[in-house]
Amino acid sequence: MELTVNGKPHQVAVEPEMPLLWVLRDEMKMTGTKYGCGAALCGACTVHIGGKAVRSCVTPVGSVNGPVTTIEGLGTPDTLHALQAAWVKHQVAQCGYCQSGQIMSAAALLKGNGAPTDADIDAAMSGTLCRCGTYPRIRAAIHDAAKRLKGAHA
């Protein structure tokens, strides 16, 4: 089957019920997307399909209908996405394990809401767990990225 991942077509020879997470990690060697719980409860495996945040650990690759964007495809090799830059600026990462899922969830939020309130951020990010508890830094980084993105589009 063919998948478009991070703007590039890829041929994969896998069973259609194989979770997208394992296709990305094991078949395509894109290890930025993490395995957390395997039950779509923690958000570590969040990617975008057709611009919407989804949990790749429970998404059969055969059901993928649209381009897939992973953390590797969010920025460019030369330029960090505004969220990635804000994550660094606000020193969000502690252990770092959930960060790709956090950033991908935040990117989906900012795509639909360029000026989120704290309540908007809390609601959008509630399903993406941070075991280190850096939620205040995550919120600050999202607000910062929203301002950067708004300035880029002004």
Image (cartoon, grey):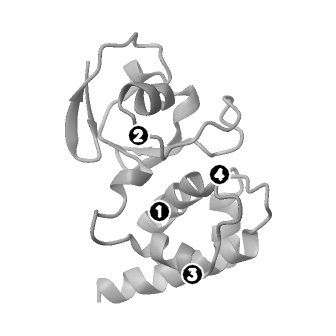
- Residue flagged by tag 3: what amino acid is it? His
For numbered disc 4, what is the local secondary structure?
loop
Give the CA distance from mark 4 to mark 2.
15 Å
Give the CA separation, mark 3 to mark 2: 28 Å
- Mark nearest the camera among 3 and 2 is 2
Residue drawn at the location 52% of the way across and 78% of the way down: 86
Disc 2, SS = loop
Label 1 sits on a secondary structure element that is helix
Q: Position of residue 39 (x, y in %)?
A: 69, 29
Instruction: Answer yes or no: is residue 116 visible.
Output: no
For marks 1 and 4, the one nearer the N-term is 4
The label shown at residue 97 is 4
- Which residue does the numbered mark 1 point to in the structure image? 107
Question: At which x and y percent is residue 8?
Answer: 20, 41
Residue 81 visible, this angle: yes
Q: How far apart are marks 1 and 4 (CA)?
A: 17 Å
Q: What amino acid is labelled 4 in the image? A: Tyr
State the residue position of label 3.
143
Structural distance between the alpha carbons of marks 4 and 3: 22 Å
In this rendering, is residue 125 above or below 87? above
The residue depicted at 57 percent of the width and 81 percent of the height is 143
Instruction: Find residue 30 and name its label.
Output: 2
- Which residue in the rendered view is the most extreme toward the left? 9
- First reached walking from the N terminus: tag 1 or tag 3: 1
Q: Quadrant of the N terminus?
A: top left
Asked where in the image residue 34 lies, by quadrant, the reply is top right
